[in-house]
Structure formats: C-alpha cells, structure tokens
C-alpha cells in the first residue's frame, strides 16, 4: 500500500524570516543541457508530449514604445557585464547579504564533492559591493575549500553568513564551516565537533543563536555564532525554532531508524536554550511550527489512526483539530498559515488529484470548508498562492467535474471563491461558452509550461503578474501569455505575448521581463513604468547567451536587475555571465506628492454600494499609491502608507461555529446537533457559543453582535492529550468516544434479541447523515489518519524551491 507522507510546516521558518527584513534572498542557477553534457548533471529536457496544444490563444493588444537614442545611451552607460572566465561550476548560488548593503555573494560549485576532486575543480566564491555591477574572486578567503552545494550560502539577521564545507570522512572528527559577520568581507574558519546532517539553522532574530543536527542524531546549540557548540540532546529526528527562544524537537528513545515509522517519537520543548526540557507529547510521528501554531500528529494506541493536535501557546496547551477523517490513501497538507488562521488541504480518496480546502479558526481547532475539488496534481503540487500585494487575496485552481482546470480567487481569506474576470483587452471566440482568465501555477511549472509562478510583493500594492490563458478553462499551450492586475486580482490586462521571466522593482514603479526560451539565446530585456500597459525593449549585450535567471535585490526597492546565463566558449566549456542593468539613471525624477493617488482597496467589486464599498474582512483600506501615468522613482525611502476605517459588523463577518450551519433559505446560523462535544485541552466539553464566530483577521466593529449565552460543561475525555506525556497502557485498549460508538457497544452486548431494533436505528442514522451532508459545514468527530514525512517536518528550505526561485512549497509530498 502506498503511503502518502505529510510534509507540514516546511515554510514556518521562511515566513518568520521574511518578517526580519534584513535577511538575503538566495537564488540558484544551473546550466542547461546544451552546454553541460560533459558533467552529466543537466536538467532533463522538456518532454515534448503530444498532449500539449498548439501555441497561441485569443489575441491581446499591448502597447510598445521604441527606445530613443538618448535612452539607449543612458542604459548602455549603466549596464555592466561580468564574465566568470575559467569557472566550470555547474551551479551558481547567488545571495544578497544584509538590507541595502549592496553586497552580493556568488558561490559557483558542483552538486557533489567527489566530482570536483576527481576532475581537480573546487568551489569559487565571488563578492560584489555595488549590487552586482562588478565581482571580485574571494575564494582565497575560504582557502579555496569545496563548499557543499546542497547547503548553499546561509544568510542570517544583520550581515551574517555561513558556508559549510562538511565532508563526513572517517579520519575527520567533524565538519568545517566558514562564518562572517561583515557580509563576507572576512571569514572565520571553524572546526565543528560533529558532522552536519542538514544546514545550520539561525534563530529568527539573533544571529548568534544557531541550532544544528548532526548525522548521528545529536542536537547542537551555539550561542556565539558558531565559535563554541554544546550538545543538548541525542536521538533527535527534527527541530524547529518557535516564538522567542522556544526550541521544539522530536527524538526517539530507542531504535532511532524506525521510531518515526512506529510513531514512537517524543516531542520536547526547551525555552531556556537547552538548560531544561518539557515533554509535550509522546507517540508522535512528526511536528511543525507555522505562524503562531505548533502542530503534531499522534498515534494514541496501536489500533487507532493518527490524529493531529494544534497549539497556539507554544505547547502549554493543545487540542485535537476537528477535520473530516481520511484513509491511509489520503493525505493532509497545510497550504499557508499565520498567527490568525491556517489553510489546510484534505485529499479525496483515490487518485483523484483533488480534495477539499479548509480554513481554521484563530485557535487552529475548528476547520471550515472553503473550496471543494481543490487541485493537487500527481506530483503532489498545489497551485495555491497568497497574493501578498493586497490583504486577504488568495488564488488557486480547481479540477471541475468535466475534468478541466479552472482558476478561482478569494478576496476574503477563503470565505468565498469565484472565477477571474476576463481581461479587458482580450476577446474570446463565439464558440467559447464561458470566457475567463485562468492562471498557471505549480502544476504548469512542473510540466514546463510556464517558467514562473504568479508574482506579487507587499510594497507594490495591488500589483500581480502571472502567466495565464483566456477561455473556458486552463489551456496546456506551451506559450501562455503574461497578464497583469493593478487592483489585487479583480481586473486583468494582457501585457506580454508568450512566456517570460519577470521581476518587480522600485516598489512596483518598474517591471522588467525577459522572454523565456529553452533553446535560443537572449540579449533583450523589456521594461515598463506603468504596471505593464506599455513596454520598451533594450538590448543589454552584443553577445547573446543562454538565460539562467533574473536576480534583483529582495524587497523590490532597488532599480537594478541582473540577467544571469552562460556562453559556450571555443573549448566547449561554458562561461558564466552576469549583466546588471541599472535603471536609476534612466528614471531620474523623484516622485512628488502629485504623483500619488488615494486608492480604496477592494472597491472594484462594490462600487455601487457606497457604505460597504471596499469593506473586506471588516475594514476599509485606503492606500497612497503611485499613479500609472507617473514615470518617476519611488526610491529606497518609499514606505507603504494606508488608512484603515472599521466597518460595521454584519452576519457576513461571522462564520457558523462548530455544530452550526448556515440555513439554505436564510443568512443566520442554526444548530445542527443538540450538543457539540469536542476535546479541548484534555477535557471534553460543550463549546460556549451562540452559533457564530468572527472570521479570523476580521476587524469590524459594532453592528451585528451575536450574544454568547451557552454554558460550558466540562467532563474528562476518553483520551488524555494534556500537557506532559500521556500514561502508556499495556496492552492497548479500545476507546468508545462518541455516543454512537457507545450505542453500538450496548446493542451488541444486548444480544440477538434486539437485531430488529439495531436495523431500525441504523436506518435512522443513515437518513440523518444524508440530511446533514447536504448542510455546510458538517464535521465528524473521527480520528484523523495522518501520514507524515519520514524525515520530520523541519526540512531544508532551500531544497523545495519553486519556479520563482523562492524557497517554499507548502504542499505535501508522496513517498512510495
């Protein structure tokens, strides 16, 4: 039987790291097959299967403006090309260090050390202090040591950097790291007392606090940026930083190789950097930390399936998540999460490639149905995307009953979903019954249909760039076009014909793009100063090269971008090339107050309702945003400013609490059952509720206010998941937790004399279940069957890169 493993919480570290604001962004480039046959580590060639449709789609009209001679000269004077002569590395790892420092580190290396030794090669390290305009070879600062490609360049808060040269050979007692506290100007050689099993993990805020896992399962801590290390625990499988200095880890007491398979791991916490420990729960399979939630899956006895628990207070208390149960053929995946709520996907039985998406309450306990038939393809990839340029907006794809993939968007954090509007400058043919825009996601990226996912940035308010097709459903054409939205996804416009790589600069004031070609070389970059309405083209080099990637400083405040690639040389050895174009001298005028406008977010959909126009999640947000016709420079000092106005609460700002559903013919919530039994903090009780619970992140005030008048009745649970390890029972016993189970037990014990009564009661229950299934939401109090990642959930963030080069994919993977 196949086992679908749950990879939950991989992005917790990344989400918190983004809040630090000073960490660098890492991008990895590698050579393509045309020039890398000698080493045999190339990307697989695109599968030219016959299932893809012919290129092309509905024609789109876009604006092209020729570059003047003066503009061309300005760009020529501010374009800088660097050729890395003699560098035969197959991989380039590019990392920005610090915030606004201008420092870029480039590591050129191989995928495995043995190849470099056999062929006499080694890693090379380059450094730029002018945002990539020029580079200097600083390999001697790390003694020309081979740096492991899979560990990459680790950048922490401030200007701290770690390079790992760990090679686990018998005669070497430990690995080697190089550390820098000055953005790579100098490096310190450190001999470790252990060999690393995965990259060293920074604390989110303090670069001196480091945690590492050794190949023999030891958990090590350093409080002085790697100078000294202390082993704090043995037998550790995975670990994760929590809030403050909380550190969570799972370990096995015996037989470490199979403990996770049996669910014999123990979850512990230390909140004083390894001085003392608290056991949170035993018999766990894996755990993770995302947003403000700690979660872990547990097998409570050998006969029961696995269940999942969530905690919002660092493990002091926790409760079982209320979700529909699933078989071992299904999987669960956390798509996104923050301090307010979680998005979770529950797979449908069988190889359906779709499931149901749920959203949680602010405690991570109760989950509500958000979207049915949510796409999760055969590679276990989800198209779920958080549009970060506008609060509350999420984009994903669903697999409809007719087998077609269609895009849907939510503007209220999964409360409701709808199809995307047709772009204003694209028309569908008469034969198309439903004309909408459909966006390509991870599913298309994995199939090499698009080179990039949808792109949005918090500083570029309302701006979204994505590949898409217009029609009845998502087309599998290998030549999708590029579309832009300026209002967070309400309205779209076709902007570039064919697939492109794109990047947002100057807080949205500048967009750059390069055509995506698998076989041809490139020499042209396109740029727009009006959010993609009109474009200019510039030939940035006289000698084209094979494109590897676009690289721009994180945070979108810079006005320069680097185009990376490689050229074939006469000796058949490709040379890495970086061309950096600085647009600051071309767009010289600083923006003034007249260049900005007040923009009410989410007003595109409610323009006719003056009182409620722009009210989403209980608040109106008015932003100060650059006008499209203003060709000026936001600059590095630009700060997003907005004014919030609370809206009066309505029933739409509340969701039906557990045990309630929204009546089909009314807008109010009614009780589905007389009681709502649930395990909370190790006790079973009735949730105090008036049938409503405010939607997470909702900021409405006044207006509708349901009165809380139900009393809490507490009694012991059949299982005891309270703080600390639960008592182990031998042999394991069978629990009858629900009234229905107790009823079945009584009927069985009563003997054959009540067979008729059993049949009648079964019929009644079947009818009631059919009725309740037609209501939304309805949940069963059954245990969750969770299959977890055999390596734990604290995976290397760099190992799950998406098409955009970002290090996060929130989806689960399957292991056979």
Image (tube, rainbow, N blue to C red):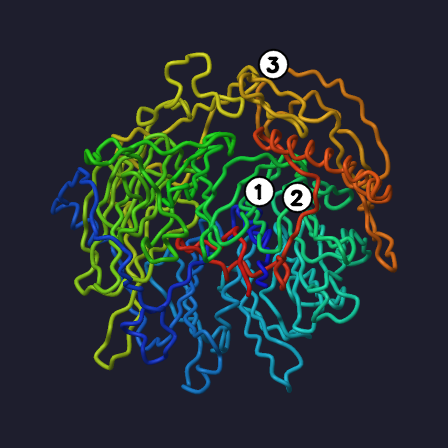
Q: In the image, is 776 to the left or to the right of 459?
A: right
Residue at label 1?
Answer: 337
Name which residue lies at 51% across and 72% down. Answer: 148
Residues tagged 2 and 1 counted as in contact (Cβ below 8 A): yes
Residues tagged 3 and 1 counted as in contact (Cβ below 8 A): no
Residue 442 in the image: state x and y as whole percent: 41, 51
Of badges 3 and 1, the one in the foreground is 3
In space, the residues marked 3 and 2 are separated at their CA atoms by 29 Å
Residue 180 in the image: state x and y as whole percent: 55, 64
Q: For the C terminus, which image quadrant?
A: bottom right
Residue at label 3?
Answer: 704
In space, the residues marked 3 and 1 are separated at their CA atoms by 27 Å
Residue 186 in the image: state x and y as whole percent: 52, 67
The tag on residue 293 is 2
Q: Residues within 10 Å of mark 2 (few under 14, many from 20)?
A: many
Which circle's residue, 3 or 2, is located before the other in the chain?
A: 2
Residue 474 in the image: state x and y as whole percent: 32, 44
Q: Residues within 10 Å of mark 3 (few under 14, many from 20)?
A: some
The secondary structure type at the circle numbered 1 is strand
Foreground: 23 or 308? 308
Res. 426 image quadrant: top left
Q: Is residue 679 something that shows in the picture?
A: no
Q: Residues within 10 Å of mark 1 (few under 14, many from 20)?
A: many
In space, the residues marked 2 and 1 are separated at their CA atoms by 8 Å
């Amino acid at each position: 039987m196949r086992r679908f493993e749950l990879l939950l919480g991989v992005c917790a570290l990344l989400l918190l790291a983004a809040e630090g604001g000073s960490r660098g962004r890492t991008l990895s480039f590698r050579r393509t097959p045309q020039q890398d046959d000698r080493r045999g580590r190339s990307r697989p060639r695109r599968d030219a299967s016959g299932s893809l449709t012919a290129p092309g789609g509905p024609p789109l009209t876009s604006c092209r403006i020729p570059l003047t001679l003066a503009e061309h000269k300005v760009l020529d004077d501010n374009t800088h090309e660097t050729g890395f002569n003699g560098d035969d590395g197959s991989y380039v790892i590019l990392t920005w260090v610090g915030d606004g420092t201008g420092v870029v580190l480039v590591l050129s290396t191989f995928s495995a050390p043995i190849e470099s030794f056999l062929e006499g090669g080694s890693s090379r390290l380059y450094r730029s202090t002018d945002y990539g305009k020029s580079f200097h070879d600083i390999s001697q600062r790390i003694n020309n040591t081979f740096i492991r490609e899979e560990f990459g360049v680790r950048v922490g808060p401030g200007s701290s950097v770690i390079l790992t040269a760990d090679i686990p050979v018998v005669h070497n007692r430990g690995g080697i790291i190089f550390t820098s506290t000055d953005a790579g100007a100098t490096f310190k050689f450190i001999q470790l007392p252990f060999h690393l099993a995965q990259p060293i993990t920074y604390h989110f805020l303090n670069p001196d606090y480091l945690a590492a896992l050794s190949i023999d399962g030891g958990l090590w801590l350093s409080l002085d940026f790697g100078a000294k290390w202390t082993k704090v625990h043995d037998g550790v499988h995975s670990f994760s930083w929590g809030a403050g200095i909380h550190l969570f880890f799972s370990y096995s007491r015996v037989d470490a190789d199979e403990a996770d398979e049996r669910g014999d791991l123990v979850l512990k916490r230390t909140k004083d950097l390894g001085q003392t420990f608290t056991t949170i729960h035993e018999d766990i399979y894996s755990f993770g930390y995302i947003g403000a939630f700690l979660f872990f899956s547990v097998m409570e006895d050998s006969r029961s399936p696995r269940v999942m628990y969530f905690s919002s207070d660092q493990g002091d208390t926790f409760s079982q998540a209320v979700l529909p149960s699933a078989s071992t053929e299904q999987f669960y995946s956390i798509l996104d999460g923050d301090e307010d709520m979680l998005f979770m996907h529950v797979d449908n039985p069988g190889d359906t490639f779709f499931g149901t998406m749920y959203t949680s309450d602010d405690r991570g306990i109760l989950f509500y149905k958000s979207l049915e038939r949510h796409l999760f393809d055969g590679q276990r990839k989800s198209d779920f995307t958080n549009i970060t340029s506008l609060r509350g907006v999420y984009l994903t794809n669903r697999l409809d009953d007719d087998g077609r993939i269609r895009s849907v968007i939510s503007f209220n954090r999964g409360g409701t979903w709808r199809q995307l509007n047709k772009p204003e400058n694209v028309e569908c043919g008469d034969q198309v019954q439903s004309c909408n825009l459909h966006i390509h996601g991870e599913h298309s990226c994995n199939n090499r249909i698009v080179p990039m996912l949808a792109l949005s940035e918090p500083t570029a308010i309302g701006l979204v760039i994505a590949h898409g097709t217009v029609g009845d459903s998502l087309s599998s054409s290998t030549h999708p076009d590029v579309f832009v939205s300026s209002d967070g996804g309400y309205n779209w416009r076709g902007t570039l014909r064919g697939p492109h790589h794109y990047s947002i600069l100057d807080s949205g004031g500048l967009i750059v793009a390069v055509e995506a070609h698998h076989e041809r070389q490139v020499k042209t970059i396109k740029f727009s100063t009006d959010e993609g309405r009109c474009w200019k083209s510039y030939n940035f080099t006289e000698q084209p090269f094979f494109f590897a990637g676009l690289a721009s400083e994180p945070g979108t405040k810079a006005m320069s971008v680097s185009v990376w690639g490689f050229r074939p040389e006469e000796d058949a050895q490709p040379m890495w090339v970086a061309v950096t174009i600085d647009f600051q001298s071309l767009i010289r005028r600083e923006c003034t107050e007249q260049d900005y406008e007040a923009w009410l977010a989410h007003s595109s959909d409610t323009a006719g309702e003056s009182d409620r126009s722009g009210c989403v999640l209980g608040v109106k947000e008015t932003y100060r945003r650059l006008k499209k016709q203003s060709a000026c420079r936001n600059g590095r000092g630009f700060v997003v400013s907005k004014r919030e106005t609370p809206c009066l609460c309505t029933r739409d700002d509340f969701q039906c609490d557990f045990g309630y559903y929204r009546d089909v013919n009314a807008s109010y919530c009614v009780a589905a059952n007389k009681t709502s039994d649930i395990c909370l903090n190790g006790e079973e009780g009735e949730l105090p509720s008036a049938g409503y619970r405010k939607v997470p992140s909702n900021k409405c005030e006044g207006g509708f206010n349901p009165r809380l008048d139900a009393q809490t009745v507490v009694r012991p649970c059949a299982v005891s998941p309270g703080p600390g390890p639960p008592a182990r029972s031998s042999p394991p016993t069978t629990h009858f937790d629900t009234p229905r189970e107790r009823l079945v037990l009584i009927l069985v014990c009563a003997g054959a004399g009540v067979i008729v009564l059993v049949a009648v009661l079964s019929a009644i229950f079947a009818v009631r279940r059919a009725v309740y299934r037609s209501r939304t939401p309805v949940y069963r109090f059954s245990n969750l069957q969770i299959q977890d990642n055999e390596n734990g959930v604290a995976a290397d963030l760099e190992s799950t890169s998406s098409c955009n080069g970002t290090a996060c994919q929130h989806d689960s993977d399957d292991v056979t």
